[in-house]
Amino acid sequence: MLQVERVLANLADDQSVWMTQAQVDTVNQLMDCKHGIAAIHGLRPSTGYIVPPVHDVQILFGIKYTNCAKRKLNDLEKIMFENVECHVVKDLKLSLLTREEQIEAFNTRKEFEMNSIRKTLDGDRDDNYRQAHDRCYAQFGKNGLKANLVTEDVGTGKDKRKEPVMLQGYPVVNRVMFGYLELNRKVIQEGEYAPAKNSGVPVRMSNCIMKELNSRSIGYKTASLGTDNFDKVVLSKTEVLAEDVGENIFSILKG
């Protein structure tokens, strides 16, 4: 049987997870880096795309989400329906509503989005979304570093949920991740968006609100470091290459 060099790493919250030695080395490199301007070369985001684009991105590294959330909440409070109306009229479903119905949906979803940010700032983790996040991610406690865990679907119907896959009693890190603010972007190759999902009015209105918010506020993003979605990260005198990060333990075992 193929053997994988693995390390049982102890995290900031006393949680223990399995990692490859390459993943441990990557985390240690990133934890030693100072906050500041950095670059991601050959970034290939996949979420929402049929064909991922390729970007070179200048970023601000080592940012805490809570600091960004305070700014986003303040900017969100200032957004009025008139600011998002230009997005609403272009939406196939929202454009069919009367203006009164559009305004009502806007007010409801704006309050929903504001309450979501407030929950994060208050440390409220009671809802299903945040509990799932806590189950399926590991926090390293510095420079916005975290990792998503290898997961599987458990249960059926309304009880269906994601749970970490255990290896000898401990979860396994899938990919190392870090948060950043995007400063500049150079498009190397255009991508192709996936067709829009058949979402309802609430989600579509939230999308319009967040589109406006992202145009006027700071955009916090997360980089997921895998062998297939970036070429290298350059931070000061440190370089992290895709081939240095490698795959997770289960992917290596599957060959």
Image: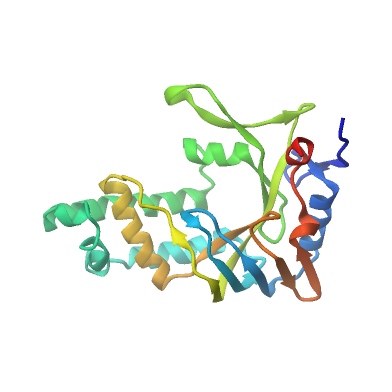
| Residue at 70% over, 61% down | 143
- Is 59 rendered above or below residue 126? below
Up-down: is 175 above or below 75? above
Q: Position of residue 175 (x, y in %)?
A: 69, 49
The residue shown at (64%, 58%) is: 229
The colour scheme of the drawn protein is: rainbow
- Closer to the camera in the image, 48 or 145: 48
**Frontmost residue, 57 versus 131:** 57
- Give 209 or 49, whichever is nearer the viewer: 49
**Residue 122 x/y as whole percent:** 51, 49
Which residue is rendered at x = 79% and y = 36% of the image?
Answer: 253
Q: Quadrant of residue 234?
A: bottom right
| Residue positioned most to the top | 156
Quick check: 206 above or below 35?
Answer: above
Q: Nearer the viewer, residue 99 or 76?
A: 99
Quadrant (top left, top right, bottom left, bottom right) of the N terminus: top right
Quadrant showing the C terminus: top right
The x, y position of residue 20, in whole percent, is 82, 45
135 over 188 or under it: above or below: above
Q: How many marks?
A: 0
Decide if residue 119 is on the left or right side of residue 164.
left
Does 62 sit left or right of 131 as displayed? right
List x then y, in percent, for residue 132.
55, 37
